[in-house]
Image (cartoon, rainbow, N blue to C red):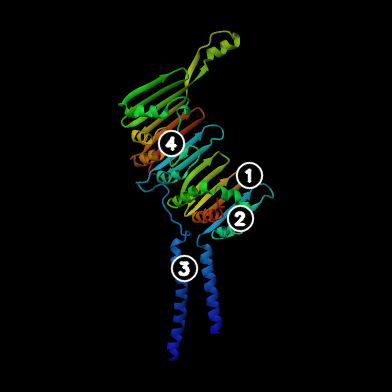
Amino acid sequence: MSTLTHRTTRPASIALAATLLLAPLAALAPASPAQEVTINPSSSSTSERWLHVRVVETNHKGETVRVNVPLEMAEKVLPAINKDRLHNGKVQINHSDIEGVDLKALLEAVRSSKDGEYVTVQSNENDVRVAKQAGYMVIHVTEKGFKPSKLDQEKDKSDKSADKSEKSYERSRVDVKVPMKVVEALLSAGKDELDVLAALRALSAHGGDTELVTVKSDDSTVRVWLDSKNVSD
Amino acid sequence: MMILAKLALGTATTLMVAGVYVFREGTVRVDVDEHREGGAHVHLWAPAAVVPMALHFVPDDKLRDVTAHSSEWAPLARIAAKELRKYPNTTFVEVEDGEQHVKVSTVGTKIQVDVTDPEEDVHVAVPLTMINDVIAQIAARQPAS
């Protein structure tokens, strides 16, 4: 073997040996989570559905809570939670659970009813309206508060026995809008059970942005909605 | 001379292989900064692969409480860790109250918890793959019923 051949063979052998030694590292590399995937945080796949919860307290601290959950993840995680009354994505309910109200019978009544307003309860404290409109179950609850008028406050100072007329005002307002398919899915479990997992799947299949729950009160605002963005606004 | 070169190559390769093996799961990062005078400043940066290995050396009695209830939370943690990997760079929970700020998010393939407080700042970042390894370790240590 000539000197030239010997000079070129040696580094080539070393390079080959090093390549062979490092080859397994290349195989490890794809599994390495050190590689970071960067995506635009404001967008996600259009098929992905995200459930967002936002709570804003209007007190001096101004606490804000934002929760963003992909429905696909919730569908996978929920069956793994087996605690208390939640098992395999289903919640056990008793008739006595909700102050004697048979929730399942109530939802079943809503499901089998025709479109239109069918429950309206008006009292001094609350106004409740439940309706079925365009494939949605709509619930509006208004909690009333009372504050004495200025005239009454003056009367109150001079004569405590005087008749007082309290002025009602909207203390809080709750708006719930749930697709009927979600309600149907919720009722698809056996007796005394609510199928939360099926409801999540129905919610996931529901197209378009949906405002599910809005609560507005003196000291806080709560919003629960569904869209295809992975960030809340 | 050639022997020395071969030794150097062998050592370097071994170190590199060992390094890649140890860091294959990324790193665990813990940063704690107390804002008070003389407060602690802890900045820990460790390979994630070391944590499941270190669990081997934790005595059984110290892990008893964790392993006893692992069947309840382990499947949930395993699925959650797997699913979270599908959502890199996403904020899942954020709480602000003027002074405090808490954020739970994924940054790449790590889950990161950031707490900013007038008294202290805490930042913890854990590779999601490490969670599965730790769960597997704990499950293996579960006493036979």
View extreme (bottom): residue = A2
> In which quadrant of the rendered view does residue B118 lie?
top right
Residue B111 visible within the image = yes
Q: Where is residue A65 in the image (x, y as percent from the top left)?
A: 50, 39
View extreme (right): residue = B38
Q: How many labels does the image show?
A: 4
- For mark 1, what is the residue? B119
Q: Is mark 3 on a helix, strand or loop?
A: helix
- For mark 2, what is the residue? B43
Q: Residue at x 51, y 18 (%)?
A: A146
What amino acid is found at the position of numbered circle 2 in the picture? His
Residue A233 visible within the image = no
Whole-angstrom CA distance, mark 4 to mark 3, is 46 Å
Q: Which residue is drawn at 47% across and 46% down?
A: B91
**Are the residues tagged 3 and 1 within 8 Å (C-beta)?**
no
Q: Residue A196 carries which label?
A: none
Whole-angstrom CA distance, mark 1 to mark 2, is 17 Å
- For mark 4, what is the residue? A224
Same subunit, labels 4 and 2: the answer reads: no
